[in-house]
Image (tube, rainbow, N blue to C red):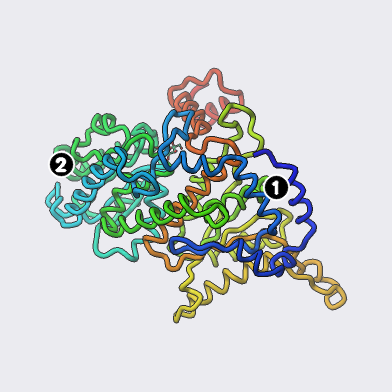
Amino acid sequence: MVLTSDLAAHAERLGKVSLRTLADSGETRSNRLLARAAGIEFDASKQRLDEAALNALFKAAREAGLEEQRDKLLSGGVVNPTEDRPALHMAYRHGARISGTPEAELVDRTQAQTRAFAETVRSGDYAPSALPIARVINIGIGGSDLGPRLVADALSDLAGDGPELRFVASLDPSDLKQAVSGAEPEAILFVVASKSFSTQETLMSAEAARDWLEGHVGPERAGAHFVAASAAPDKARAFGIAPEHVFDFPDWVGGRYSVWSAVGLALEIGLGPDLFEDFRAGARDMDAHFAVAPLEENIPVLKGLIDVWNRVALGYPSRCVAAYSARLGKLADYFQQLEMESLGKSVTLDNRPGPTPGGALVWGGNGTEIQHSFFQWLHQGRDVVPVDFIGIARHFASSDPRERALAANMAAQGAALLDGRQVDPEAEPLLAAHKSMPGGRPSNTLLLDDLSARTLGALIALHEHKVFVESVMYEINPFDQWGVELGKVLTKGILDGEISEYDASTRALLARTGLIQD
Ligand code: F6P
């Protein structure tokens, strides 16, 4: 979608209207900016949009073929042409129109395998060094880390007894050291999660873990403490993992969409297969909504179009994710990878320079802590950053005053960003300008009925689909990530000492620091 003259005109017109005036303009507008599905309420009534601009957005979406592209995605069409494959992660929750297909059969088989293994480990029957498994350590990075980590943080409170979950993503040896600390080596199970099974960080950490474990349980036993989740099962077996402990998934599951697949194995063990299935069911609820709801009432569509509006029509380069739950500590990180690896592109599907700069920079953290760090910048800095407030509906009427205060803080921040404050200079001649706040800063409020496995699944699926909606509008492929390749190649060059073609600054840095002799 090139920024149509229609949309540009609406953006210019609405740029002159106060956000307060828009917010107060009546129920018809507010109702069009409010939608509910799968245990989530999406309230966009604090956006710089009115009905005419919304109509223009939906018109642009239809002209971009959004409905056809959505159907192509959900029916397994090749939506990732640069890698010549579909994007069928939804098959792992049997969402939309996938049921009954060969993909669903494959998924059923591998899900039965991971469930059986998870149950064996949880029962204590899996004890390769005579102790039941008490700690599961996921070794992975990017999509093979962030999904399991987010879900473990969010749902561990709801899980019954099960092995404790830890994560290793960094090459810094202290990451592995901390992950094993306090556990009996004989009671640890490592899940090596890597779609490609060739990611340097993951393989080096897995090798270090194996060396460490061999030192404790002996080389003959160490192997059984390792299982793998991978789309490259041959490589996992070549690493030394027993074939029956290599849980595979197809390459049409993208790394940042892989938590639903065997990459969720650590979760299935730690949280239990039933809770993990509830998580998938929530995503399935959102898939069903995305597949059939009219565009105007479709939350992923509305959310995606609003993000496009803010990014392209209003020109806001970033978006803040503010999650008002301590259990959603990794949500901003997760959305950051999902969105920035998917939408950080500026070449169209048919190889033209993109008509837009691609998706926004995504960043954020947890409320209320972030109110005491970067919210000052959001309120009085020059840059306007739309905020997504993500909270729990139950908190508003909770009997626990802390939960009510958490909810009140979230609502107050949205109101403050919208309205700002004008302090009368006559009343406070010295401080009026410092204390005044411009307001006019848009936000969304996403309320989960409660933070359950089901609503978390729906929240993630909502964002997966809204990223797809944006990609259609930007005319880009959201499922590849060629931009991360160059750094991997150059790292190898450095470690191999082949840097004669590198720039003088980098060569000097490496010579000075002793990594390499120039
Ligand atoms: O950073 C690129 C990337 O390929 C991500 O897309 C992926 O989630 C991550 O690396 C890890 O890859 P793998 O699962 O193949 O180890």
Residue 345 visible in the displayed image = yes
Q: Which residue is mark 2?
A: 221
Q: In the figure, 440 relative to 514: above or below? A: below
In the depicted view, which residue is nearer to us: 420 or 260? 260
Q: Amino acid at mark 1?
A: Ala
Q: Crowding at label 2, few (<14), some or many (≥20) Cα neighbours within 10 Å?
A: some
In this image, 211 relative to 124: left or right? Answer: right
Label 2 sits on a secondary structure element that is helix
Label 1 sits on a secondary structure element that is helix
Q: Position of residue 291 (x, y in %)?
A: 46, 49
Q: Crowding at label 1, few (<14), some or many (≥20) Cα neighbours within 10 Å?
A: many
Q: Of discs 2 and 1, which sits in the foreground?
A: 1
Q: Amino acid at mark 2?
A: Arg
Outermost residue, top side? 500
Quadrant holding ligand 1? top left
Q: In the figure, 249 relative to 131: above or below? A: above
**Residue at 62%, 60% in the rendered image:** 443
In this image, 446 relative to 192: left or right? Answer: right
**Residue at 19%, 36% in the rendered image:** 242
Q: Which residue is mark 1?
A: 313
